Amino acid sequence: MKKILLLCLLASNSLYAQKLEKYCEVVATGKLFSKKVTIEVDFGEERSFFKDTRLRDDDGAVVRFNSLVDALNYMGTQNWHLVNAFPLSTGGAGGKVLHFYFRKEYDASELAPETKK
């Protein structure tokens, strides 16, 4: 009985230790004299001027959003959970900038070796 209890305890600890959290930021910037917004998603990866960093689906196609709500719904379908949201007034031509922070839990086995930090 003690061996079974010890085995269960070790198994539960190893499962818990393999969970990782990743975060991302969705930034919505309003356009002047329009209801349209520009959506940017930042996963914390290095960006280069010459590299295409647009968000892509599993098939490699660029993901396009009809609205801010469309972008937030998409993040939900990808199992991202909203952590925080806040507006910033830029005072510029675009008006407001909205920031949304999301969290997603992964098993360590799901991530590529270079992303396990």
Image (tube, rainbow, N blue to C red):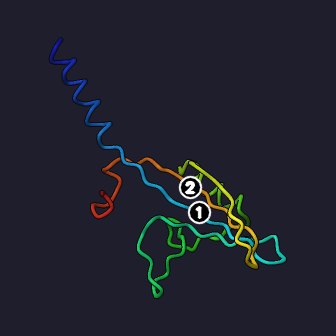
Amino acid carrying label 1: it is Val
Measure the C-alpha gap from mark 1 to mark 2. Answer: 6 Å
Q: Position of residue 91 (x, y in %)?
A: 74, 73
Residue at 82% over, 74% down = 34
* Quarter placement of the N terminus: top left
Name the residue located 61 percent from the left edge and 57 percent from the top edge.
Answer: 100
Few, some or many C-alpha atoms within 10 Å of disc 1 (few <14, some 14-19, many ≥20)?
Answer: many
**Which residue is at a point 29% across and 40% down the rendered structure image?**
17
Label 2 crowd bin: few (<14), some (14–19), many (20+), radius 10 Å: some
* Left or right: 33 in relation to 115: right
Q: Which residue is mark 2?
A: 101
State yes or no: discs 1 and 2 in contact (Cβ < 8 Å): yes
Residue 7: percent from the left, percent from the top? 20, 24
Mark 1 lies on a secondary structure that is: strand
Q: Position of residue 29 (x, y in %)?
A: 69, 70
Query: Nearest the camera: 41 or 84?
Result: 84
Name, please, the residue furthest toward the front. 91
- Which residue has dot 1 on it? 26
Position of residue 31 in the picture relative to residue 102 (left or right): right
